[in-house]
Image: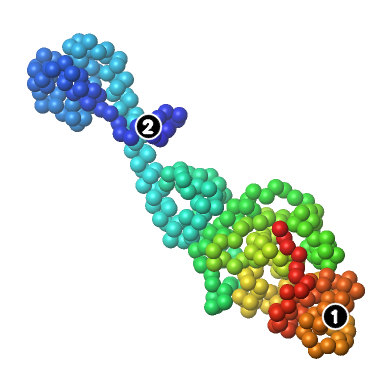
Amino acid sequence: MATKNNRLIPGRAIHPGEILREELRERGIKQKDFAQSIGVQATHLNEFIKGKRNLNEDLAMKLESQLGISFKVWMNLHNGYMYESKALKEKRAEEQYAVQFEQACANIFNIQALYKRLDLTMLSCTERVKEIKKLFPFDLLSSNELRMQVSGMYKHSEKVQIDEKNMLTWLILNKLEISRIKTLNNYEKGNATKAAKEIACMANNRTLSIAAIEQCLNEYGIAYIKVEKLDKVPIDAYSTISGNMPVITVTYRYNDLDKLAFDILHELYHIEHHLSEESNAFISIEGTEYSNDPREKEANDFARQMLIPDEIWVNILKVGCTSLSPHQIVKTIATEAERCGISPSIAIARYKHETDWYRTSSYKSPKIF
């Protein structure tokens, strides 16, 4: 049973004629005889009993006189019926609108996944629509525009499967989380590069943690949030500007702290050099193989340089190894990397990527959790 203005709305409005019909039945009075006794045409009384005519004051007075049920009771029944009829009409209109709204949303994004993430699945259709309209600071039916914010469109491949509706659902959830961010310190040009240096240093010193990343970014006026992945949405990280505040969103799609560091450094470069009114969001999907945008390569190069400057990497690779065994080479690189102040797991990850050799399980990255 729904409510309106804290008043319960029944499943249907009960016309006073129904009450009269039951009253006459209980007293054993025939409608025709009763109509004659109160001076009303039998057809008019029958229409009232069937709910086809509304109660008026004259009839209410006659009912009081003949049945001993007060005029006030009959008029209250009438007023209640009129109120409930209007409320039910509004409720049905709301339900119809909610159904149409959900159908329109379902044509754009995965609304069921959205409800599940927001824990709204068990609510009625009308209640769900009311809740998401309160939650979101923008019209969900125009949310398709979120795709246009992302610079460097992702491409499909056999390796990277992307569900377009789920992708947009993730972007919607991300925008919701961004709207909830509390105000941080003012961001100034150059802060992203400063934050990148500190994060890279922590990664190589093996002191990096989620708390340390968030604290570092926040101190430089950059927000940091997590929005969990959805099925067939291979997003690693996302950067955008909300007002004047840069935001980095991560998914922790891989439980890999070194990869997370790389992704954040990648987004910090976008924040420092690429975000603008024309390009106000960047998205990293399955590394950055999805895009031919040269800005993605620039961000990749920056992240790689921050973690291991090329001159140090060259020196690491110069160290000779007496064995041709790839496993021994990996061990030699790890040892030299540590001597140079580089995390062995970061060095080995770069070696595996550059040589396309992933057969070793040694020197794994620290886990996020």
332 is higher (above) or lower (below) than 133: below
Which residue extends farthest right? 339
Q: Amino acid at mark 2?
A: Ile
For residue 208, say whether it is visible: yes
In-image side of 123 versus 285 (left or right): left
Q: Quadrant of residue 124?
A: top left
**Residue under the point 20% across and 22% down:** 22
Q: Quadrant of residue 194?
A: bottom right
Q: Under tag 1, what secondary structure?
A: helix
Q: Give the alpha-carbon distance from disc 2 to disc 1, as whole Å.
A: 76 Å
154 is higher (above) or lower (below) than 30: below
Marks 1 and 2: in contact by CB < 8 Å? no
Please state, as top left, top right, bottom left or bottom right, where the C terminus lies in the image: bottom right
* Residue under pointer 2: 9
Q: Amino acid at mark 1?
A: Thr
The disc at residue 332 is 1
Q: Residues within 10 Å of mark 2 (few under 14, many from 20)?
A: some
Task: Count up the numbered dots.
Answer: 2
Q: Residues within 10 Å of mark 1 (few under 14, many from 20)?
A: some
- Image coordinates of residue 221 in percent, x first then y, are 77, 55
In-image side of 345 versus 146 (left or right): right
- Image coordinates of residue 228 in percent, x first then y, are 61, 58
In the image, which is nearer the foreground, mark 2 or mark 1?
A: 1
Q: Quadrant of residue 40?
A: top left
- Image coordinates of residue 136 in percent, x first then y, are 55, 49
Q: Under tag 2, what secondary structure?
A: strand
**Residue under the point 44% across and 58% down:** 106
**Residue under the point 39% across and 34% down:** 1
The disc at residue 4 is none
- Image coordinates of residue 300 in percent, x first then y, are 73, 74
94 is higher (above) or lower (below) than 338: above
